[in-house]
Amino acid sequence: MLVAGVLGLVVGGGLGLLGLVTPARAQRFVGLSPSAPEGTGETRATYGGFFLGLELAAGWAWWRGSLAPMTVVGLAWLGAALGRVVSLLVDGHRTRKNLAGVAFEAVVGLLHLAA
């Protein structure tokens, strides 16, 4: 499904761009705050450059006819949702934001897999 795959790439890439360009906003979005000066660089690198690069690579490979990277990225998003479920169950962090995070990450993962 073309539309689902493109939407997954746009959402994931958009979040990467957010982390790269406005790390403070990305930190607020995910509920993190840096405890050291390197924290902002880590946000730009991980939530920014890594996510953006991953989504761009998956989109480029998909455009070239390979579905494998989209599958990997989709499974990675589902893995993030699984990690959040573990936090809900083990850590007891049953907040509205964590529950929404599970749904969001699962949907983005499924969008990638629908490609």
Image (tube, grey):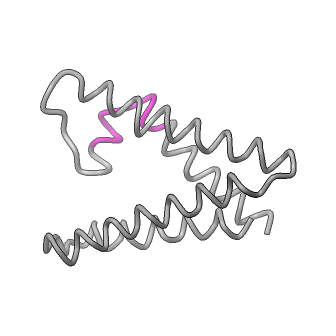
Q: What residue is shown at x 44% (from left), y 64% (from top)?
A: 79
Percent position (x, y) of residue 87? Answer: 23, 68
In this picture, residue 110 sits left or right of residue 18: right
Q: Which residue is rendered at x = 64% and y = 52% of the image? A: 9
- Where is residue 43 shown, x and y percent of the image? 34, 34
Magenta range is: 18-27
**22 part of magenta stretch:** yes
State whether residue 59 is above or below residue 72: above
Main SS category, magenta section: helix
Residue 8 versus residue 65: which sits nearer the camera? 65
Per the image, is 26 magenta?
A: yes
Residue 15: x and y in percent read 49, 45
Side of 113 relative to 46 (left or right)? right
Q: Quadrant of the N terminus?
A: bottom right
Q: Is residue 9 above or below residue 75?
A: above
Where residue 71 sits: x, y (%)?
66, 61
Residue at image position (39%, 29%) is 44
For residue 31, side relative to residue 100 (left or right): left
Q: Is residue 37 shown above or below 106?
A: above
| Identity of the residue drawn at 49% across and 32% down | 49
Tally of numbered discs: 0
